[in-house]
Amino acid sequence: MLAFRLTGLPDSRLPLYLYCVGTQEEKVQFRPDGFPVYQLFLLRSGKGELKVPGEGVWTVSAGELFVMEPGVAHEYIPHSKTHGELGYIGIGGEAAGAVLRSAGLLPMRPWRLSEFEQFWSRVTDIWHSLDNGMTEMWNSSAVIYQLVLDLSRSILPLREETGERVARSGSLTRSERESESANEAFTRAVSLMQTHYQDDLLLKHVAEAVGYSVQHLNRLFHQRHGITGHQYMQRLRLQKASEWLDKHPQASVREAAETVGMEVNYFIRMYKREFGETPGKEIKHRIQLKMEKDSTGPVDHLYEV
């Protein structure tokens, strides 16, 4: 077993830091005042009951992880006298809770891990590095962040979760499940286009972001709009450019093209194809309308490229 190991005083600039690490024989634990930081418990062997007043009671088995929030009273009672092994890592820092929650390790509950022994070895490696004075606080912060990410990837569904998931999926036909997945992917694709129409965004990158091939994503756009994803994104940019020109009647064609992330000559051709006239003529028309209202004088230079 590896003795309880505290680290040094953390740098205040660290949003995430290692507070402690160690392993111990599974035994009764009672902490009425909780622990000062987040604790990650890994049960290598044995089995026990974790009680959190006001939250619930969980059975924690070998090969599982449990994350305890700071300041939360809890009690752990082993089921047998065989004394299994329990590893723990304390994580502090202003970002600790947000990182653990974003990684899916919170709210509190047991999580089964794939390749559990690999993580157990990493806990012992961290302990030895600290004990040998080989890990500075800043380095250990990066190590802990990577560990959290890897734990997130390794979460497996527990038995009762699996049963619920099977029951839910069993109530849907295969085509219904595929349709639901396609709707989610399409909605996310459109959202990405709406958010990043000004950026150098390619359809293949949108497809990758939603987990589809370009061909599959194009099929979804054809089904819903009768056009390809590229055509949809192009029309979106042109429409945004037209809206921008409405709000900036004295802008130039180049400014309008740059606003929606398009090369100016290509923008002019596509704009005319979409709206029936070049953006320069539209700008000139809008400026003339403005002149009629406020008599501003010559403005030919404003609609030049």
Image (cartoon, rainbow, N blue to C red):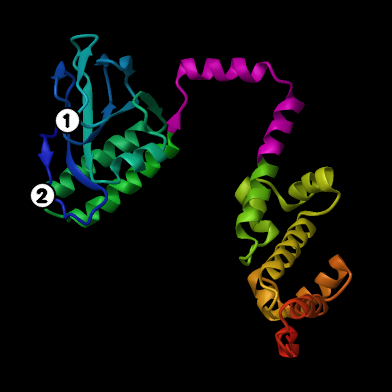
Horizontal side, residue 261 vs residue 24: left or right: right
Nearest the eye: 159 or 117: 159
Residues in magenta?
Answer: 155-184
Judge whether 165 appears above or below 295 on screen. above
Compared to 139, does 223 lie above or below?
Answer: above
Main SS of the magenta part reads: helix
| Residue type beneath disc 2 | Gly
- What's under tag 1, amino acid-wise? Phe
Task: Indicate the position of residue 29 as horizontal and vertical percent values.
Answer: 15, 19
Where residue 209 appears, x then y in whole percent? 60, 50
The residue where tag 1 is placed is 35
Residue 266 visible in the displayed image: no
275 falls in the magenta region: no
Instruction: Specify few, some or many for label 1: CA neighbours under 10 Å numbering under 14, 14-19, or 20 or more.
Output: some
- Residue placed furthest toward the right: 276
Q: Earlier in the sequence, mark 1 or mark 2?
A: 2
Q: Is residue 164 magenta?
A: yes
Q: Nearer the viewer, residue 277 or 219?
A: 277
Q: Is residue 279 left or right of residue 245?
A: right
Image-based side of 108 in relation to 71, left or right: right
The quadrant of the image that shows the N terminus is: top left
- Disc 2: which residue: 8
- Describe residue 45's horizontal placement relative to residue 224 as left or right: left
Secondary structure found at label 2: loop
Q: In the rendered structure, find residue 276 and report the number of the disc placed on it.
A: none
Q: Position of residue 25 (x, y in %)?
A: 16, 23
Quadrant assignment for the C terminus: bottom right
